[in-house]
Each structure stands twice: as C-alpha cells, then as structure tokens.
C-alpha cells in the first residue's frame, strides 16, 4: 500500500466553482501534513501546511482528519491560475527528514 | 530570493555511462535531497543529506550514489545509467530548524537514458 494516495483526477471545473479533493495516508504516526502545488513542467512549491485545527489561506482551505487518516484541500472561487497538480505530502515522526509525496491531483479550471 | 539550482534542464545519456547531476543552494540549508518524479508514482526519495559529508539512503537508492563535500552542493551520481533511470530528477533543500519542513526545489533535470 502506498504511504500517500491521491485521486489523480483530473478535476475539470469552470471559473468561480468550488473544487475539493482528499488525500489518504497510511502511517498513523504521521505528524506533519502539507499541500504542494506543481505547475506543468515546473518544480513543486509549498502551498500550505495543514494543521490539526484546519487552516485557511485566502480561497484555499485545508483540513486534517486523523481518525480517518486523510487530509483535504478545498479551493473556492476557482481561477484559471489555479490549474495545476496538487501534491499531498506527509512526514512521519519516525524520521523527520523524509517526506512522502502523493502522485498528485490535477485540477483544470476552464473559462 | 532563495534559490536551488540544478546544472542541467535536459540531459541525454547512453546506457552504461556515468552521469553526474549537480545541485547548488544558496540558502545555507543543512538538509538536501534528491528525488525522482515519474508519472503516476509521485516523487520518490533517492538520497538525502543533513550535513556535509553525511548521506542517508532514501526509498530507492539502488543504482545511485551521492556526494556532499560542501554544504551548498549535493551531487547525484548514476554509476552506470540504465533506461529505467529515465526520469525527472528534482533536488531540494530545507533548513534544519524548519518546523514545517518546507522544501525548496530546483527546476529539475529531465534525464533520458538511451
């Protein structure tokens, strides 16, 4: 079983729509959770960390559900510029240097 | 602005060649990483280093080695390139003190082994 699993999508949504997707992780000892964004043919960049209480950054909301071992990302009022692949990233307390990456969820926002 | 620089954007090599991928960061970061990214598989950790001359195996170290002689430079070596090492290689760095494990990535090297 993969450590981090994501629905690859693609999620095709019109501008202004809300899109949400989840990521499941297998290691119940995981302590840190992140969403990275990767544009086509570019390197990944940190979008936001995910905190136990959930957190919001503008139009982006991240939630953590430890009981069911998943994190989610919700994008409100989608913009064309939100089109990208979103990578779920998890690290285990057992080794702080190693992060496990999901394969990514592709979002395409159309005009 | 923080920067992680990878020496080549595209590289084409032949099977059996020794290949060097170079990565330099200008942020004085302690931690450096090499990942490969393949469609449907995500990023997989090859090797990482948390200090000069230190290295640790990641999840897929076979066929690779690394060198970290200076804090700012982390090299990935393919001892004898094979076609299954055709991939996008991404270098990253992070601060030892970072509590959120923010990684800064280079722009990647697309390696094709023929």
Image (cartoon, grey):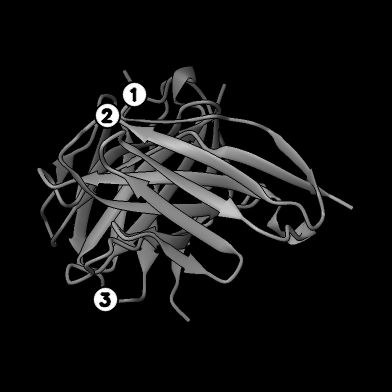
Whether residue B104 appears in this view of the structure is no
- The residue lying at 45 percent from left, 55 percent from top is A62
Q: Chain of mark 3?
A: B
Mark 3 lies on residue: B28
To which quarter of the image does residue A105 belong? Answer: top right
Circle 3 — which element?
A: loop
Earlier residue among tags 1 and 2: 1
Q: Check the image and name the residue furthest to the bottom.
A: B1
Q: Percent x, y for residue B102?
A: 34, 63
Q: Chain of mark 2?
A: A
Q: Is residue B108 above or below residue A49?
A: above
Residue B34 image position (x, y, % from top left): 34, 46
Q: Locate residue A19 relative to residue A43 in the image: left or right.
A: right
Labels 3, 1: one chain: no
B101 displayed left or right of A78: left
Is A77 situated above or below B16? below
Q: Which residue is mark 1?
A: A2
């Amino acid at each position: 079983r993969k450590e981090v699993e994501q629905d690859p999508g693609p999620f095709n949504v019109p501008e202004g729509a809300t899109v949400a997707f989840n990521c499941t992780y297998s290691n119940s000892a995981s302590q840190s959770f992140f969403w990275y964004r990767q544009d086509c043919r570019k390197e990944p960049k940190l979008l936001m960390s995910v905190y136990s209480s959930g957190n919001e950054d503008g139009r982006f909301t991240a939630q953590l559900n430890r009981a069911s071992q998943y994190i989610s990302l919700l994008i409100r009022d989608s913009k064309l510029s939100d089109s990208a692949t979103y990578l779920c990233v998890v690290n285990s307390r057992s080794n702080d240097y190693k992060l496990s990456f999901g394969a990514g969820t592709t979002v395409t926002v159309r005009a | 602005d923080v920067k992680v620089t990878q020496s080549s954007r595209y590289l084409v090599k032949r099977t059996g060649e020794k290949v060097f991928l170079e990565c330099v960061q200008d942020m004085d970061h302690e931690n450096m990483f090499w990942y490969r990214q393949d469609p449907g598989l995500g990023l997989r950790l090859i090797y990482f280093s948390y200090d000069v001359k230190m290295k640790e195996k990641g999840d897929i170290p076979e066929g690779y080695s690394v060198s970290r002689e200076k804090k700012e430079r982390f090299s990935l070596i393919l001892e004898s390139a094979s076609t299954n090492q055709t991939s996008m290689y991404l270098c990253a760095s992070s601060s030892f003190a970072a509590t959120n494990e923010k990684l800064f990535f280079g722009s990647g090297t697309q390696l094709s082994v023929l």
